[in-house]
Amino acid sequence: MTNKPLPQAVEPQIYYTGELMTIIENIDFVDSCVDFKWRFEIEEVWSLDPASFKAGKEPVFKGWHVNTVFNRPDTNTGEIGEGPSRKEFIPAGSTASGVFKTCYLLVFLTTWHEIMESMIYKGFRPFDPHNSVDELVSIQKAKREATPGVRRKNFVTLIEVKNES
């Protein structure tokens, strides 16, 4: 008995904001602990490279930036208000599946962000997602200064390429 792969349905591609909005309007949430009154915002993305601009050409439609807006307590004041997520890009020509999965990703990342922000240890947020990369590096610098002589080996090894011609 051989396992043949199931045929994949061919989904229509979307190229218009109205089509995108129709897909997003069909996304909903059942009552649960992650009921943050989610909604999505859409922004069209157009592009024009400098040479085309100088030549007087029209911008080209590329797709959409999509983000979610949700209710949550403010990280500093605790007051309930709306907060936006980061934006993700959905290219023109995507399918309903691609749109849904991108919206899922936004909700997933936002929920993860909120958990990182709300979980405390000894009164502090060890996983505070608002720490800058420089703040995170300062932790590593402090560890290095506290343990002189202990160094991790570099994980990157450069390979010399010989020219054999």
Image (cartoon, rainbow, N blue to C red):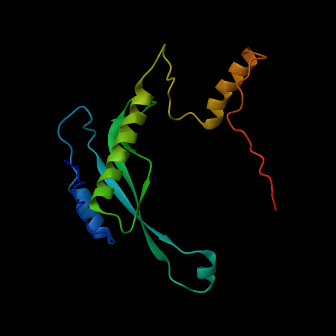
Residue in view at x 17 percent, y 40 percent: 30
**Measured along the vertical axis of the image, is residue 44 above or below residue 29?**
below
Instruction: Tell me the quadrant of the picture where the C terminus can be found.
Output: bottom right
Residue in view at x 67 percent, y 25 percent: 140
Asked if residue 131 lies left or right of residue 104, the reply is right
Q: Position of residue 87 (x, y in %)?
A: 44, 52
Residue in view at x 32 percent, y 40 percent: 71
Residue in view at x 67 percent, y 28 percent: 138
Viewer-proximal residue among 160 and 52: 160
Asked if residue 160 lies left or right of residue 156, the reply is right
| Residue 77 in sight in this render | no
Q: Position of residue 98 (x, y in %)?
A: 33, 57
Q: Position of residue 112 (x, y in %)?
A: 39, 35
**Measured along the vertical axis of the image, is residue 126 above or below residue 60?**
above
Q: Position of residue 101 (x, y in %)?
A: 32, 51
Viewer-proximal residue among 165 and 126: 165
Rendering quarter of residue 38: top left
Asked if residue 159 lies left or right of residue 126, the reply is right
**Measured along the vertical axis of the image, is residue 107 above or below residue 155?**
below
Asked if residue 165 lies left or right of residue 23, the reply is right
| Residue 3 in sight in this render | yes
Q: Residue furthest front?
A: 1
Viewer-proximal residue among 116 and 156: 156
Q: Residue furthest top?
A: 122
**Measured along the vertical axis of the image, is residue 161 above or below residue 72?**
below
